[in-house]
Image (cartoon, grey):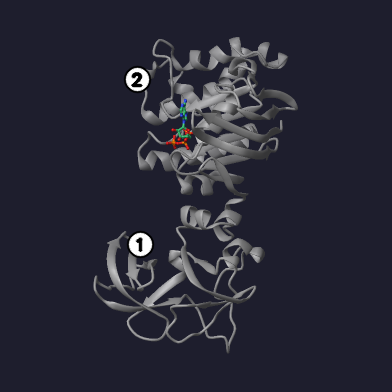
Amino acid sequence: MATEIKNISKVFGSTHALNSINLSIKDGEFIAILGPSGCGKTTLLKLLAGFEYPSDGQIFIDQQCVGEKNNSTPPEKRNIGMVFQSFALWPHMDVKDHIKFPLLHHRFLADDLKNNIEKRIEEVLNIVELQSLSKRMPHELSGGQKQRVALARAIAPKPALLLMDEPLSSLDAELRMEMRKEIQSLHRLTGATIVYVTHDQEEALAMADRIVVMNDGQIQQVGTPREIYYQPNTEFVAKFVGKANLIKGEWINECTFRPHDNTDHSLWINIDASPHLRAKNLCPIRPEQFTLSATGSGIEGIIKNVQFQGKEIHYTIDIGSDFITIHEDSQNNNFSVGDLVTIHLKHSEHIAKPTLNYVKSKNS
Ligand SMILES: Nc1ncnc2c1ncn2[C@@H]1O[C@H](COP(=O)(O)OP(=O)(O)OP(=O)(O)O)[C@@H](O)[C@H]1O
């Protein structure tokens, strides 16, 4: 069921938490709301849930206006499910009762579920693979199992909209990776519409159908993970999602760029960038798209920091006018702090022999 957010603003005292947000969420879509701390993600989720009302604008769930200025349908009267970072399990209920509770109390429960509660409990236990733990109490479960109970409770009544607020952030790194797959599989199995708040760009890129990137209470860009990663519209999206270097220079035409700091003045060809970045004479190059050498022509710089990361080495290079980040394969690279190096685009060649040296996202 579709959800429409129309011109939503939210003000707390002098803080403009949300400024004129517009977003259409399609039935069955997995949307990630991605942005740094304080950008308004949780406020947007609270408005969708009904814990806050908008200062301006309207929210429609399944064509029903559920939120507008000074008028908000409370959470229990919205057809939604919620999963929180803290799991929010009830200490006195076992796993099965957590799933049963919303089936007994959800206002929008379809008749076939109402009449077959035991069958639905079994189905949901199967989806989250907790069949053998149905009699366990919360204190007898691991962190990952607790989060699966929270997911099971939220999906049991088949809500129109499933809202998730950083549901994996209290789990350790390995379990988070595992749970990402489980949430993806849960989305496939249930076909639920999901709005998933996170500040973790990898999580958003890995799971969402579309990502909404926010900063300072505003939407910076909405797009598929590939669009957001390969075609950042703004400096903020380029930096926050792709950790891109924004190289200063001059656009010769739509896809040819001359970096200011290039010692040999050669051109980078077949480069893609949004009109906004082109107008600012910036070219977004992600850390893995550059390579380093000890000699040759290109952008010269001095290595300021080195971080060994196993598969990759991350270098920070001072080029005088800026700092550039480069991720290189650790097997082939062994530069040290203080080394003088030259920076090139990977596979780059001079303008005399054009080749595709930057992924053309429109074709990818
Ligand atoms: N009840 C409130 N009263 C006053 N200010 C608030 C309230 N709730 C949120 N804010 C402010 O609104 C802004 C957005 O907050 P919000 O919690 O939505 O950010 P967020 O992106 O979810 O951040 P985080 O990732 O840290 O949770 C912040 O400046 C915050 O301080």
Q: For the residues marked 2 and 1, what is the alpha-carbon distance in whole angstroms?
A: 38 Å
**Horizontal relation, residue 115 to residue 139: left or right:** right
- Which label was assigned to residue 140? 2
Q: Closest to the observer: 235 or 103?
A: 235
Rendering coords of residue 157 (x, y %)? 62, 20
**Mark 2 or 1 closer to N-term?**
2
Q: In this orientation, does residue 363 appear?
A: yes
- Which label was assigned to residue 311? 1
Indicate the amino acid at tag 1: Lys
* Label 2 vs label 1, nearer the camera: 1
Q: In this orientation, does residue 118 appear?
A: no
99 over 11 or under it: above or below:
above
Rendering coords of residue 54 (x, y %)? 61, 27
Quarter assignment of residue 308: bottom left
The C terminus is located in which quarter? bottom right
Q: Closest to the observer: 281 or 240?
A: 281
Instruction: Residue at 53% x, 40% y: name it.
Output: 217
Instruction: Residue at 57% x, 34% y: name it.
Output: 186
- Considering every residue shown, the one lying at the far front of the view is 14
Q: Give the secondary structure at mark 1.
A: loop
- Which label was assigned to residue 12? none
31 over 101 or under it: above or below:
below
Rendering coords of residue 256 (x, y %)? 59, 77
Counting other residues with Cα less than 10 Å from the Cα at mark 1, is it few (<14), some (14-19), or many (20 or more)? few
Counting other residues with Cα less than 10 Å from the Cα at mark 2, is it few (<14), some (14-19), or many (20 or more)? few
